[in-house]
Every structure is written in structure tokens, then in C-alpha cells.
Amino acid sequence: MRCVCYYKKMGRQSKFAPGVKKSNYTSEGASVTPGFHRFYRKASAHDDEQSFQVVAGQTDLWITVRRVPGIDFAKEALACVADLRSQLQSWMLLEPAFGPALTPLSVPAHAPHIVRRMSAACARMGVGPMAAVAGGIASLVAEHLLRFSPDVIVENGGDIMLHSTRERVIALLPDPGRKAVLAVRIREGEFPVSLCSSSSTIGHSLSFGNGELAVVRARDAFFADAAATAFCNALREADDVQKVLDTAAELGVAGSAAEKEQRGAQEQHPEPGDGAWGVEGVFVQCKGVVGVWGNMELVPL
């Protein structure tokens, strides 16, 4: 799903791009289709990090990693994306109903790994399996790059998967005209974290609601993406903000000692793609009404 987040490092203030510029540049020689840069990708990396863009078909990633001599991160990421897209395309040829499905769709055990995880996460939230495709690709590409770097941030159309040894700040953009004004602080030791979003007013995502923005924080990016879609679908009127927060609390892992104990047990034996860690936090906005629940430490930019 499309999202409206960008990340920046702590310390030296990062500046927004003054506008949208065309470019086909990427570090490490990855193949990139010329197109418009998203302005929220202007954020700078730490001095020992590098950021680069990888584009394959509709997949457009912005990746930040710790520099490692001799590792062509963009080449690794591009190969991983190509493999994941091939698996999805092949499966949709075999199962034409998978792509356009707007409700949960079960898949057999022999389906590709990414297909099974998309299906499982979306089934829990009552949405079609493609609702988890962007978060899922970000998650699996990040997992692949973790073999080479302890810090990996992968943003896919705004859906972000973060593995980091450092504190990070993720900016929220409920109103593109005003740029980002709020951000979520993620402290050292809280990773891995995914922040996925859905909007009925920004980007190309399909939404059946009227929400300006629904952002879900979770450890499982497949689940976070599916939950963001479901929550945004549920935002029709301003009164729905509280209903979404109540639903998030029911699916949440923040708060009570019992919930934290349950999360600890699940993290030892998680079931891939079933949203084992649940919702950690939510930010939603509909018709000017904002609601926040869970571990969402908001800070001004």
C-alpha cells in the first residue's frame, strides 16, 4: 500500500526537497527506470551509511544500509526484488483470482513463501492478499540484506521495514500540501519495526474509506500493511477514528504485562505472516480528526 512516511537520521537536521525532480541515478549501479523522486526520500543517511533506489516494474524501493566494502547492495536488492516479483507473477498466472481478490483468499502449502505470508496476514485483517504486497516485499528485501549489514531500512511506496542499531525518526505526512509536521521516534533496542500506511486521498492505493491516513506499527510488515488497509477502509466518518483505535487495541501487544508476556512467547516461536506480534501502535486521521494508540512516540519536525 502507498504510505506517506519518510525517515531521517538523528542529529543534523535533514531538509525536505524543494520540489519533485526527475532522476535515474542510484548508487551501486542498480537498474532504475527514470521517474519522479518522492520528496519524502530527501532524508540523509548517517556518514557510514548509503542510500539508493531500486526500481523493478511497479516496485520502487528506497534503501539505506551500513556501508560494507565489497558488497554491491543495490545488485543484491535488485536480484531479490526480481525473484519475488517472478514468484508473484507466476502464482497469479496459475491462480488468476489471487491478484484482484478483495477478500481473504486461502492458498495451498506449496504456494511461494511470499504468497503464503501475504495470504495469512490479510486473512487475519479481512482484506485481499495484495493488500500486503508492498510491506511484504520491503520485509523480504530487508531480510535478504541483513546478511550483509546490521542496519537495513527498506521503503516501498512509503511502507517501511526497519532493522537498526540506532534510534530513527519516521515522519508522517497526513497532508502533502503542508509536508510532514509530525514524526514517530523509534528508539534503539525497539527494532525490528515496520510502519505501513494506507490513504484514501494520497497515492494510488485502493481504499474503500475516507481516511486521510492510517499508519500501523508492527514487527511483521506483511501484517502491518494488511492492518493499515483494513483500518483505512473502516475510516468513513470522523466518529470512526475511535472505533479503529478500539480495534487496534484488541489486536495490540502494547500495554499490559500479560500482553507483553504473550508477545515474548510469540517472538520465540512466531508463525511467519500471521501477525504473531500484533499491532504495536496506530496513527489515524479522518476528516481532520486524529487518533493515536499504542507505542507511537510522536515528535515535531
Image: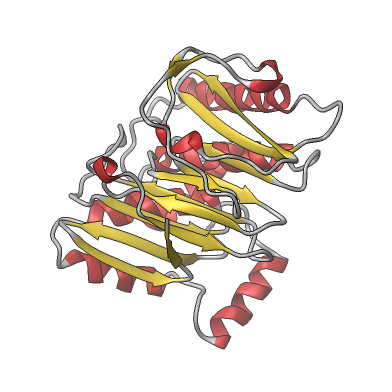
Q: Where is residue 199 in the image (x, y as percent from the top left)?
A: 29, 45
Q: Where is residue 85 in the image (x, y as percent from the top left)?
A: 55, 24
Q: Is residue 126 above or below residue 19?
A: below
**Looking at the rendering, which quadrant does residue 190 occupy?**
bottom right
Q: In this view, does 10 lie above or below 89?
A: below
Residue 109 visible within the image: no
**Looking at the rendering, which quadrant does residue 103 occupy?**
top left
Residue depicted at 72% across the width and 26% down the height: 76
Q: Where is residue 6 in the image (x, y as percent from the top left)?
A: 47, 44
Residue 159 visible within the image: yes
Q: Is residue 189 left or right of residue 176?
A: right
Q: Nearer the viewer, residue 103 or 143?
A: 143
Q: Which of 212 and 93 is in front in this view?
A: 212
Residue depicted at 49% across the width and 16% down the height: 23
Q: Number of callouts in the render?
A: 0
Residue at the farthest right position: 70
Q: Is residue 98 left or right of residue 246?
A: right
Residue at the farthest bottom position: 257
Q: Is residue 286 above or below residue 229?
A: below
Q: What quarter of the picture does the C terminus occupy?
A: bottom left
Q: Which of 64 and 162 is in front in this view?
A: 64
Q: What quarter of the picture does the N terminus occupy?
A: top left
Residue depicted at 66% across the width and 22% down the height: 27
Q: Nearer the viewer, residue 252 or 193?
A: 193
| Chosen colour scheme | secondary structure
Q: Position of residue 295 (x, y in %)?
A: 48, 70
Q: In this view, does 48 lie to the left or right of 246?
A: right
